[in-house]
Image (cartoon, grey):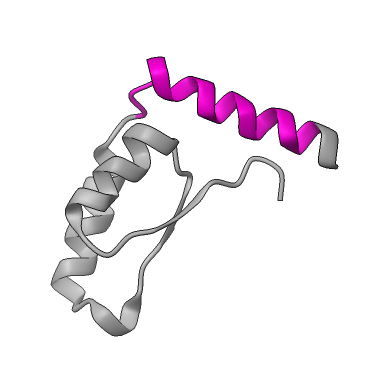
Amino acid sequence: FKGIRAALVWDERIAVLSREHNDANILCLPGRFLNEEEALRIVKIWLQTDFAGERHQKRIKKMADIEKSAF
């Protein structure tokens, strides 16, 4: 779907990177491998982390351009 940038996140570090670097807007958690406490901590961090922009913006633009031509 247009505009979807999903990230499979299994720990806090990946949560931060998926938001800062890829501007992920869908969080996917491997429920079988996380307990409730870990999952809630990851969700909180993911929601509180902003996109870093700058050099990462180029990647997001490339994805948007591909979406425009593919759909």
Asked if residue 70 is positioned above or below residue 8 in the image, the reply reads above
Q: Give the residue at x 60% y 24%.
A: 61
Quadrant of the image occupied by residue 67: top right
Q: Name the foreground residue: 54 vs 1.
A: 54
* Residue 25 image point, x, y percent: 48, 44
Number of labels in the image equals 0
Residue that extends furthest to the bottom in the rendered view of this protein: 32
In the image as oriented, which residue stretches furthest toward the top? 54
Q: Specify start and end residues of the magenta stretch as a single range.
A: 51-68
The residue closer to the viewer here, 40 or 21, is: 21
Residue 6 in the image: state x and y as whole percent. Answer: 50, 53
Q: Is residue 1 left or right of residue 53?
A: right
Position of 54 relative to 68 (above/below): above
**Residue at coordinates 63% horizontally, 34% vertically from top-left?**
63
**Is residue 13 found left or right of 5 in the rendered image?**
left
Magenta span contains residue 4: no
Q: Is residue 37 left or right of residue 46?
A: left
Question: How would you classify the magenta stretch by its main secondary structure?
Answer: helix
Residue at x-position 18% and y-position 54%: 12
Q: Quadrant of the C terminus?
A: top right
Residue 51 to residue 44: above or below: above
In the rendered image, residue 53, in percent from the top left (x then y), is placed at 39, 20
Q: Is residue 52 within the magenta segment?
A: yes
Apparent side of residue 1 relative to residue 60 in the rendered image (left or right): right
Measured as percent of width and height from the top left, residue 1 is found at 71, 51
**The image quarter in which residue 39 lies:** bottom left
Q: Residue at x 72, y 28 (%)?
A: 65
